Amino acid sequence: MNPKPSVERGRWWQLLLFMVLLALGYQLLDRVEHASFSYSEFREALTAGKVREVTVSADRISGTMAPEPPGGEPKPFVVIRVEDPELMRELVAHGVKVTGTVPGNPWVQLGLFVLPLGLVFLVMRLSPSAGTGTGTPGGYLSVGRSKAKVYVEKSIPVRFSDVAGVDEAKSELQEVIDFLRSPDRFSRMGGKVPKGILLVGPPGTGKTLLARAVAGEADVPFFSMSGSEFVEMFVGVGAARVRDLFAQARQKAPCIIFIDELDALGKVRGTGPNSHEEREQTLNQLLVELDGFDPRGGVILMAATNRAEILDPALLRAGRFDRHVLVDRPDRAGRLAILKVHARKVPLEDEKDLEFVAAMTVGAVGADLANILNEAVLLAVRRQKQTVGRAELEESVERVVAGPEKRNRVLSHAERERVAHHEMGHALASTLLASGQSVKKISIIPRGIGALGYTLQLPTEDRYLMTRGELEARIAVLLGGRVAEELVYGEVSTGAQDDLLKATDIARSMVKGYGMSDSLGPVTFDLERRSPLYDGSVPGSRGDYSEELARRIDQEIRGLLDSQHARVTRVLSENIDLLREGAARLLAREVMSGEELAALVASAEGTQDKPPGPEKDAA
């Protein structure tokens, strides 16, 4: 039986009781303690000269008496008015100050009483709702209610067929669906479904979509709530919302509770400056609810996070979130499957173009691929085409990677020349060094917010490991643009700022995180990767080891950058003519494809005695 109607009636009774008490208080405050007496006593006091002033109204006479002892306080009084024609004459004769009042409109008096109550009620009704999606009123009366959005069975159109590229995660979650559909199969064997299932993966990989697909496949209600929605300005609200959420879920069992961005709620507890008592109280309540779960109750708790390393260890132990499902970036086949799902309603010139996009988008997640396909559709509509072709798909990839073209950003001829040499330096360094990436396109057309040109480089295949030599080559390629400016112009510009930032990050990771330093040895200093001790604070890297060791780390990072700077300087110096020729062609055409660059390098190999091919010594 649903207790919500009785709860609502209880709230209305509480509000009615509050209004009655307020009315009684209003009446009590209106009654001032007076020295009230009969009208005869009032006339006697008037004759004796004891009345100082009076106020005559329609039904009463009020005023103050003269103080009896010297230095005493005037005493107020009130008497019922009696028709007395001689009263006014005697008041004037005894020198009493007389004032009168006009009778008030009873409707106005009623309005003055009802208006404050109405305002209080209106504020309580219109204040931010608890957002339960169940029709309950919001405001302060429901501040402790869960803000979860409830999707009933028929309102969840997402199925496993709508989720692609995460086949391993889907197979992991299939038994959850089987449990919700037929729990007797598990109970007969003494099996229990995991209490908590944590979806872990980078942003945009489809964790929320996967959770909704599980609910859709199982045909059960779905409670969705963000971790940040549990905590607000009132102390204890978060814990109350956790209790209410689980209470609602038990009433609709079997069902699924999904908490998105669990790291906002489940960050590791601590006593440092980043501790948050209200958040920790909410987390404690969540742990209590997980411990109190009835494994046969049919309520499955799912959560998603992209920062599993900062979650509290008590949340991840067996019996709570004891199953962790990785929702990782898709490989090439996964990207193609995702593109096919999003392209179901998109008219394509050739479905094989999706394979081209899947090959160009190494490292992209599902959200990126959906955005790329949507940008291609918008470009086709803008060009008044009826279908989406490869040109639109390729342009949409570039728009997502580097931003839209900014042809109205006019550069001087000298700036365009410098940008052409800069980008050609990147392209030649990537081609002549074993960087593990192939150049797809070079452009000196400004794009996005600050890019005056770009070199689109893509991995030749999906990679999950990188060697030290490949990382060093990446640094050299990033420094190639700056080195090209040094060789051609003798000085550098501000265009290499982003390149230097990325190169420094790679070098720092090699020295501090991957143990790729000969002098420091296989030691890691990357404190952010320590889990679960990391409490979310900014790591004080120089406070966890000596100043001398910190100085050596800085020297190693600088030495790594300097060595790769010298390496790419040597390679580009040996191919300076090729650099100048490529920059001239790029300046004339503004865009050069990877095939054109390969042909340019091949032609230079055939005309030079010493070919400029990939360097033999990568040291």
Image (cartoon, helix red, strand yellow):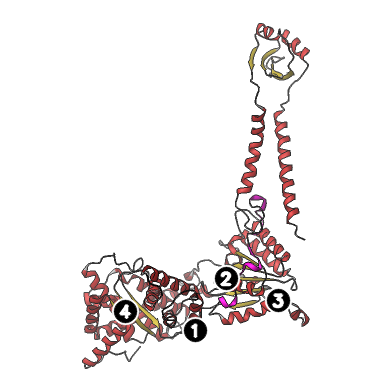
Residue type pointed to by label 1: Ala
Q: Is residue 150 magenta?
A: yes
Return the disc, 4 or 1, that comes first in the chain's sequence. Answer: 1
Residue type pointed to by label 3: Arg
In the image, is residue 84 above or below residue 123?
Answer: above
Q: Is residue 256 left or right of residue 451?
A: right
Return the disc, 2 or 3, that comes first in the chain's sequence. Answer: 3
In the image, is residue 528 above or below residue 113?
Answer: below
Residue type pointed to by label 4: His
Q: Secondary structure at mark 4?
A: helix
Disc number placed over residue 181 in the picture, else none: 3
Residue that carries the numbered disc 1 in the rendered image: 333
Residue that carries the numbered disc 4 in the rendered image: 426
Disc number placed over residue 208 in the picture, else none: 2
Real-space CA distance between mark 4 and mark 3, rounded to the nearest whole angstrom:
56 Å
Q: Nearer the viewer, mark 4 or mark 2?
A: 2
Real-space CA distance between mark 4 and mark 2, rounded to the nearest whole angstrom:
39 Å
**Does the residue at mark 4 contact the one at mark 1 (Cβ under 8 Å)?**
no
Looking at the figure, which quarter contains the C terminus?
bottom left
Q: What span is colored magenta in the figure?
A: 139-162
